Image (cartoon, rainbow, N blue to C red):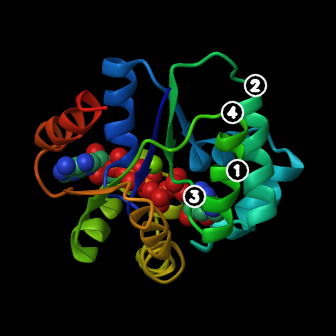
Amino acid sequence: MINIVLFGPPGCGKGTQASKMVDKYNLCHISTGDLFRSEITGKTALGMEAKAYMDKGELVPDSVTINMLKLKMQSLPDVNGFIFDGFPRTIPQAEALDNMLQEMNEPVSKMISLKVRDEELVKRLLMRGEASGRADDLSEDVIWNRVRVYNEQTLPVASHYQKQSKLVEINGEESIEEVFGEISKILDSL
Ligand code: AP5
Ligand code: MG
C-alpha cells in the first residue's frame, strides 16, 4: 500500500493534485473537507456541526474529524492505498492516523507538502470563490483566517512527519503539470 499525506495551506492545490494522482496511481482519495461538505449538503447533524466551524475558517474539533475519517476508511477495504487530503491538520489527528495505519500494518509512506505564499493562496481562493461559490471562499476575511489557522495550528504537523523522515516539500507555485511531475517522481520512487 502507498499512503500519502497531501499537505499544505488552503488553496495550495491539494484537491487538484489528488485527482491527478487518483487517475495515474489508482489510489483512494479522502478529503475531510469534501466529506464535511457532503454532510452539509445532506443536512446531517455532523454537517451542521462542521458548518459552524467551516464558515468561520476554523478547524472542526478533532474528535468529530477523527471519527468521520475512521468510518470512511473502514468503508473502503482492499484499496491500493490512500491519499489523505486536508488530514491530519493537528498533532492529535496525526497520532490517530498513525495508530489507524499501524493497526493495518501500513504506515504513512510520505507527506508531500505543497509550498505556496499566503498572498498567492488568497488570490487563488478569491478567484475560485467567484466560479464555485464555495461558502468559505466568498469572504476575504474568512480566507485569511483559514491561512492563519493553517500557519498556527496545522504547520506543526509537518515536523511530526519530518521526525519520521517522511516529509518532502514541493514548490506549489509552478504550473499544475510541473507540480504533478514532481509528485509523480516521488510516487514512482516508492
Ligand atoms: P478543505 O476542504 O480541506 O479546504 P482547504 O484546506 O482550505 O483547501 P482547499 O480545498 O481550499 O484548497 P486545495 O489545497 O484543495 O486547493 P485546490 O486544488 O482546490 O477544508 C475546508 C474546511 O473544512 C476547513 O477550513 C475546516 O473548517 C474543515 N476541515 C477540513 N479538514 C479538516 C481537518 N482535518 N480538521 C479540522 N477541520 C477540517 O486549488 C485551489 C485553487 O487554485 C483552484 O481554483 C485551482 O484551480 C487553483 N490551482 C491549483 N493548483 C494551481 C497551480 N499550480 N497554479 C495556479 N492555480 C492553481
Ligand atoms: Mg481541497
Reading the image, the residue beneath label 2 is 75
Q: Residue 137: x and y, percent?
A: 45, 62
Residue at the spot of label 3:
88
Does the Cβ of the disc 3 residue fall within 8 Å of ligand 1?
yes
User: In the image as oriented, which residue stretches furthest toward the right?
Assistant: 45
Q: Where is residue 111? Give x, y as percent.
A: 40, 52
The CA distance from mark 1 to mark 2 is 17 Å
Residue under numbered circle 1 = 99
Task: Please tell me which residue is depicted at 69% across the width and 23% down the height of the picture.
Answer: 76
| Contact flag, marks 4 and 1 (Cβ < 8 Å) | no
Q: CA distance from mark 1 to mark 3?
A: 12 Å
First in sequence: mark 3 vs mark 4? 3
Q: Nearer the viewer, mark 1 or mark 3?
A: 1
Q: Which residue is mark 4?
A: 104
> Which quadrant does the C terminus fall into?
top left
| Real-space CA distance between mark 3 and mark 2, rounded to the nearest whole angstrom | 19 Å
Label 1, secondary structure: give it: helix
Which comes sooner in the sequence, label 2 or label 4? Answer: 2
Q: As shown in the figure, which amino acid type bears the numbered disc 4?
A: Met
Percent coordinates x, y for residue 54 in the rendering: 63, 64
At horizontal 74% and vertical 65% (from top left) the residue drawn is 62
Q: Name the amino acid, label 2.
A: Ser
Question: Which of the two marks, 2 or 4, is nearer to us in this view?
Answer: 4
Query: Amino acid type of disc 3?
Result: Pro
